[in-house]
Image (spheres, coloured by chain):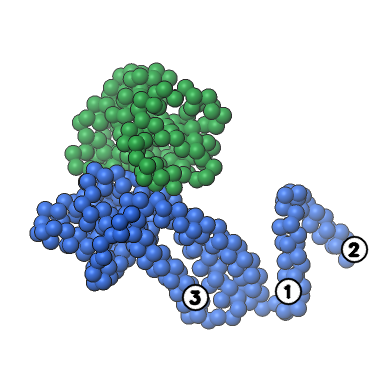
Chain colours: A blue, B green
Amino acid sequence: MTPPRSLPPGTWLHVFARLFAVQGSYNYEAMIGNGIAYAAEPAFRLLPGGRDGEAYRAAMARHSRYFNAHPYLAALAVGALVRAELEGEQPDRVERFRTACCGPLGAAGDRLVWAGWLPFCSALALLAYGLGASAAGVLFVFVGTYNVGHVALRAWGLRAGYREGLKVASALASPVLRTGPLHVARALAAVAGAALPLVLLRLSGAPLRPFGLALGAAALLAVALTRWQARVDGWRVGVALLLLFFLYSVVR
Amino acid sequence: MAIEVYRIDDRLVHGQVVVGWGQPLALGFLVLVDDQVAASDWERDLYRMGVPPEMAVYFESVESALSHLAEYRQLPDPGLLLTGGTATMRSLVERDPAITRVNVGGLHHRAGRSPRLRYVFLDAGEESDLRAIGARGVDVTAQDVPGADPVPLDELLARSGG
């Protein structure tokens, strides 16, 4: 594949900064279409004729139309669309690309961000609270971590989209999007597992030793369930635990 | 199992299709009927990325779809057939009498189209296609997701705004 022409750093910066406003004119008719055109506009100024040229006006009209995708992964579409316009792709081909990439970008973004990164950052903030952080510290952990993730995702998306152009499916097959959600979900489970008991401990003000013993027993049970997950039903474990509690209360 | 839904949606494969309809109907496959997508590698690659691994997606032109529809109806899982516009669906309906219901899932804002529902905008040609489909006895309703109330064709065409 021929490498794309290089863009001035100022243009990249303008486009990247405008990606943060991609939902600024969200509406039912065009969804984030206006935001896509607004984000790509600094690069469209490089089209033949500049801002007064026919190519610029046509590109702006084309990209202000309906477009719906995950707002962070829209960066991938913006990168690809900028390259397509600057390379003079046929308008019909560009239109078809806009239609085709909405679904995959929406699905990938939902899995990675709404179902992965956002809950992970929330669990991390809970962990910080459980470990004794102040309110400002908890806020800093949540906002800081979340922003690092989505800023990095937008930067990667813009770069990958411009590099791949209309063949952006290969970027969508990148490990970031294919296996990223799985890794984030695992990390979320681990962090939430550590955070919730620590938060309960801090909220209850209970003595550390008995709470630690209960926590250790719960951890052992969790490990055992993980090992036997293919052979043990949840309801059987629940009934067994209820029986144990019943026996304990009778003996006691 | 049958093809459960014959859907017109200009977004083709997206969340409402794979999750909104896919989960409650336990869809096992999608048939995307579009002459241009069927002939384009990069478009097929992109649409595949929007489909979860457990769901198959088949790409067909109008002609190839008509010759394969009977086979799709024999598959063990329920399926959904998608077209991006009314004209393609009309071509299928006119040549395959087994299609008895059509779902208008989404035709969005574009120059020349006027609003009928929040998710349905139609131009004169599309209105004519839908009337022609309905005139063949096919039950045409607009419904974006299974939880929404279906809007019958007469009511849809009588509406003038979202």
Q: Which mark is residue A251?
A: 2
Q: Nearer the viewer, mark 3 or mark 2?
A: 3
Sequence-wise, which precedes: disc 2 or disc 1? 1
Mark 2 residue type: Val
Q: CA distance from mark 1 to mark 3?
A: 26 Å
Q: Nearer the viewer, residue A168 or A66?
A: A168
**Element on which disc 2 rests:** helix
Q: Are marks 2 and 1 on the same chain?
A: yes
Q: Are marks 1 and 3 on the same chain?
A: yes
Q: Is residue A73 above or below residue B130?
A: below
Residue ID at (64%, 73%): A198
Tell me, yes or no, if residue A204 can be seen here. no
Tell me, yes or no, if residue B122 can be seen here. yes
Is residue B126 left or right of B152 when viewed as pictured? Answer: left
Residue A67, x across and y down, in percent: 30, 50
Query: Mark 1 highlights which residue?
Result: A211
Sequence-wise, which precedes: disc 3 or disc 2? 3
